Image: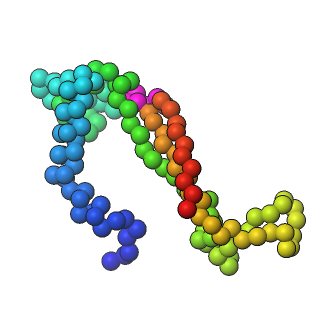
Amino acid sequence: MRASKKDNNRTLWGTFQNMEIMYDVIYGELVDSGVAKVLPEPVWVDVDGNKVDAEAEAHGCKVAIELVHPNCFLMGDETGCNTNMKTDGHVGGKKHMGEARTRGCNKRAIATDMHFAVLPFTNALGEPVSALCSHICF
């Protein structure tokens, strides 16, 4: 077996049953807040969200709720990076920074970790809502 970069707890937690529980909770909150409504009967929809009659024309599973206000359903996904390039695979394992077009002793190794995180938010229509940035230094 190859090594995995993923956390073991993620593998243990990420079961179909746990995903169903998570989505049931999210759908319940959407309905309770008025952002979505429960459909009388689940329906097939195409990739654009239009109702279709046959599974062959559908995209994904049957849909049991309908978003009434998709602009009010916000999603955020944290992403970030480390500006330290010491493990980027460069020959010798180090990157140096310095003045452009110069050589020699005025370059120094980047030795400290500098992390940053970006939190992009979109609504259920896929439109950007805002972007927050936080600087975290270690």
**Horizontal relation, residue 24 to residue 2: left or right:** left
- The x, y position of residue 35, in whole percent, is 28, 24
Query: Closest to the observer: 49 or 32?
Result: 32
Question: Would you say residue 124 sits in the magenta stretch?
Answer: yes
User: Please, what is the dominant secondary structure of the magenta stretch?
Assistant: loop
Quarter the C terminus occupies: bottom right
Q: Quadrant of residue 74?
A: top left
Magenta region, residue range: 123-127
Residue drawn at (40%, 30%), measured in percent from left and top? 123
Query: Closest to the observer: 113 or 65?
Result: 113
- Vertical placement of residue 58 versus 116, above or below: above
Q: Quadrant of residue 64?
A: top left
Quarter the N terminus occupies: bottom left
- Vertical placement of residue 54 versus 76, above or below: above
- The x, y position of residue 76, in whole percent, is 41, 40
**Horizontal relation, residue 61 to residue 105: left or right:** left
Residue drawn at (38%, 37%), measured in percent from left and top? 75
Residue drawn at (36%, 25%), measured in percent from left and top? 72
Query: Closest to the observer: 37 or 32?
Result: 32
